Amino acid sequence: MKVFVSLGSNIGDTDENLNEAVARLEKYEGIDPVVWSEIYMTEPQGLKDQAWFANQVVRFAVDPELWSPHGFLSTLQAVEGQMQRVKKQINGPRIIDLDLILFGDEVIESGEYLTVPHSRAKDRAFVLHPLAELESELSFPDGTKVSEALDKIDYRIEGKKIYQN
């Protein structure tokens, strides 16, 4: 099953933090990274007074007999914990942030715990642009193409920097 995860970091060696998170996920049976987007520097959303984020999207091949969306999300949160992520404030600085964007064609809304596709994925250029880079014809379960979602938001890209208000 194709599973897409958005990774972000703005503390320490951000590129290494992204690589470490993928390496930790790869150690779990039935989770195999397949393709990585470029790493983009993104201005912070919400809380602006902090370092820019290194963001990337990775497509994983996940064995659906071993992994449910809830179990996979718990594993993402476990990796964040292993890497010493501390949630001090919403949208604040973090060593690693792992967001489950798509889990195959699953659609799940279970309150604050799990929403798939990710509830803000269609509003975030730092998610959509790397998704389009990985699979230009990718669509969300509701049929919206990633390229269509990108056309609806206000952003710009300069080199490897993504700006969005």
Image (spheres, helix red, strand yellow):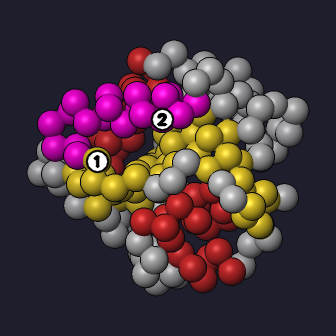
Which span of residues is magenta-colored? Answer: 14-32
Residue 13 image position (x, y, % from top left): 58, 24
Residue that mark 1 sits on: 33
Q: Secondary structure at mark 1?
A: strand
Q: Residue at x 74, y 61 (%)?
A: 158
Count residues near mark 2 (Cα–Cα under 10 Å), then give few for <14, some for 14-19, many for 20+: many
In the rendered view, does 12 fall on the left or right side of 93? left
Q: Which quadrant holds the N terminus? A: bottom left
Q: Residue at x 29, y 40 (%)?
A: 71
Magenta: main secondary structure equals helix
Residue extending furthest toward the front: 159
Camera sees residue 87 = no
Q: Residue at x 52, y 81 (%)?
A: 144
Q: Residue at x 79, y 59 (%)?
A: 164
Q: Which quadrant holds the C terminus? A: bottom right
Query: Which amino acid lies under the numbered mark 1 shown in the image of this protein?
Result: Pro
Residue extending furthest toward the right: 49
Camera sees residue 107 = yes
Residue 89 image position (x, y, % from top left): 74, 27
Q: Secondary structure at mark 2?
A: helix
Looking at the picture, tell me which residue is in the foreground, 125 or 121. 125
Q: Quadrant of residue 22?
A: top left
The reply to whether the magenta stretch includes residue 22 is: yes
* Mark 2 → mark 1, Cα distance in angstroms: 13 Å
In the displayed structure, would residue 110 be above or below residue 124?
above
Residue extending furthest toward the left: 65
Query: Which amino acid lies under the numbered mark 2 shown in the image of this protein?
Result: Leu
Residue that mark 2 sits on: 18
Mark sitting earlier along the chain (2/1)? 2
Count residues near mark 1 (Cα–Cα under 10 Å), then give few for <14, some for 14-19, many for 20+: some
The reply to whether the magenta stretch includes residue 62 is: no
